[in-house]
Image (spheres, rainbow, N blue to C red):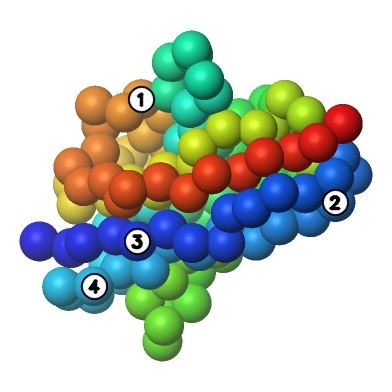
Amino acid sequence: QVQLVESGGGLMQAGGSLRLSCAASGRTFSGYVIGWFRQALGREREFVGALTWSGGYADSVSDRFTLSRDYAKNTVFLQMKSLKFEDTAVYYCAARGRAVGVGRFPKTPDEYDVWGQGTQVTVSS
């Protein structure tokens, strides 16, 4: 079973950039789908993006966030730029060991098997 640890969160002014990391341990996650979700205070967890052979993103972040994978480090990165106040949330990465259809990106929490503990991102306006 893979374990996930997020890092890279913090406080940033609107318009700034942050890069979040999701490091896997326990086994290589080269065959896993990695998803990112976020949960703002008082709101449901929402899909941000997922990485299979390519990246798929929520409409609200598709022009600002980019996913990438470093196989040597067993880590997935979420590069966030042009941050907005509404990006403030706890960000979670999740792994799915089951295959998905070509061109499909799992977008609901119950489609994932393993979760990290989350990292807080706070954007000041």
The answer for how far apart the CA atoms under marks 2 and 3 are is 23 Å
Q: Nearer the viewer, residue 103 or 55?
A: 55
**Quarter of the view holding residue 102:** top left
Please give the count of numbered marks on the rendered protein.
4
Q: Amino acid at mark 2?
A: Gly
Query: The residue tagged with tag 4: helix, strand or loop?
Result: strand
- Name which quarter of the figure residue 64 lies in: top right
User: What residue sits right under mark 4 in the picture?
Assistant: 25
Mark before the other along the chain sequence, 4 or 2: 2
Q: Residue at x 37, y 34 (%)?
A: 106
CB within 8 Å, label 1 to label 4: no
Is the Cβ of the residue at disc 4 closer than 8 Å to that at disc 2?
no
What residue would you read off at disc 3? Answer: 5
Q: Which residue is mark 1?
A: 108
What's the distance in space between the residues labelled 1 and 4, CA to CA?
A: 23 Å
- Horizontal side of residue 88 vs 100, given as left or right: right
User: Residues under labels 2 and 1: Cα distance?
Assistant: 28 Å
The disc placed on residue 16 is 2
Q: Earlier in the sequence, mark 2 or mark 3?
A: 3
